[in-house]
Image (tube, rainbow, N blue to C red):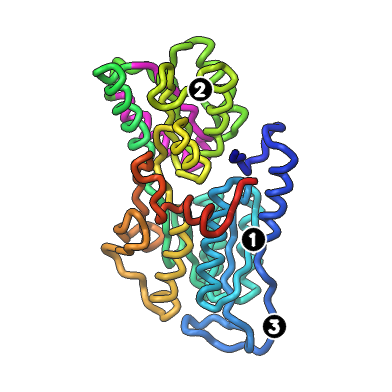
Amino acid sequence: MFHSLKIKKGFLTTLVLLLCVALLASLAGCGGGSGKDKKDEVGQAAPSGDKPLVVFAQKSLGYYFFVAEQESLKRAVEAKGWRFESAVADFDSAKQTNQFINFIAKKPIAILSDPIDSEGLITAVDKAAKENNIPVGIVDTPTTGGKVAITVAFDNKLAGEMAAKEIVKRLEQKYGEPKGIVLNAYGAMSSWAWRLRKEGFDEVMKQYPNIKYLAMPGEGDMTKTHDALVNALAQYPNLDAVHAPSDTPALGLFEALKQKNKLFKVGEKGHVIFVTIDSEPVAHQKIKEGWYDASINQDAVSYGQIAIELMEKHTLKGEDIPLGKYTNDKYYWKEAEIKSSPSGPYLIIPPFVVDKSNVDDPRMWGNITFNEWGLKYN
């Protein structure tokens, strides 16, 4: 049985708390040495005799997704023979800014970050990139400006649209037309990603007047998401479908259905359509067991790998990363587009549907982290 790494209101056991501590310890970066300075290709000083250092200012390790994202980056860096070091801000934007700025003194060849505040980190980004000539890479949550060598992010709005369409498709299969009662226990609107996912989901639902659409705040928290569904079921006991914008809060929906004796497998009478976003290993297991219908994949493994690949190939040689098509057959999605943005080149990873037909594909990030890397929930 899987468990989330999100720690809220006693929903998790002591075992999960111990796991989270162990993961934090295992993923913490190694320290750096010192020595005489030498200039690398982008003009940044690096300690003589040491391997080049790449650092990562991470927003959190409280979700499996972020643990996988950081592990992927760490592996990509170390595969180059470089050193990796990280700092975790625990969703404190001021703390993350300080950690980012403190990294500058270590004279890394690159600083990467998954920002908490898309605007608030810009000053730190420019302090590194413009004032100290240290290239900056951004993953997952883009900044709204600043000098960024590459941003690797996700089409969150499209993911929300796709999740809604998966539900509509199944309502049509159930009733012969798009009708029914749908709950979206949406995430915190302070989150750039969750806000876009809600916008995409909302836009699709508005197209179907015969669907009773319940948009209730789950805040991305398991307990609040659980409570949102309990409250919805009190008023609408014949609810047809549920959605959560990430797999951690989705476990709250799962527990609420179980608690209210509404948990049935796909194909069984009474099944509540269940679609999530992120496609973590826990979603894979529940799809295979028949509890979930589908999950929209956000490729956590590709973020760091692509950022390091492009920065090594171009940025660290003093070149701009070219715009245009990016292809890589090792990823299930294979193709993406690098476009221009206010902060620089921006690669948008496309979402795709994971269901029983493809859930075992070894290119799925959840299969890589869980089966190959051994990143477990318990």
Locate the N terminus by quadrant: top right
Q: Which comes sooner in the sequence, label 2 or label 1?
A: 1
Q: CA distance from mark 2 to mark 1?
A: 36 Å
**Residue 6 in the image, given as x and y percentages of width and height:** 63, 41
Outermost left residue = 176
State the SS at label 3: loop
- The residue indicated by pointer 2 is 263
Of the pair 273 and 123, the residue shown nearer to us: 273
Q: Quadrant of residue 353?
A: top left
Which residue is painted at 27% across and 22% down in the image? Answer: 172
Say whether residue 204 is magenta.
Answer: yes
Whether 25 is drawn above or below 315: the answer is above
Badge 2 amino acid: Leu
Q: Quadrant of residue 54?
A: bottom right
Mark seen at residue 34: 3
Say whether residue 29 is magenta.
Answer: no
Q: Is residue 292 left or right of residue 165?
A: right
- The residue indicated by pointer 1 is 27
Of the pair 225 and 149, the residue shown nearer to us: 225
**Residue 310 in the image, given as x and y percentages of width and height:** 40, 70
State the SS at label 2: loop
Of labels 2 and 3, the one closer to you: 2
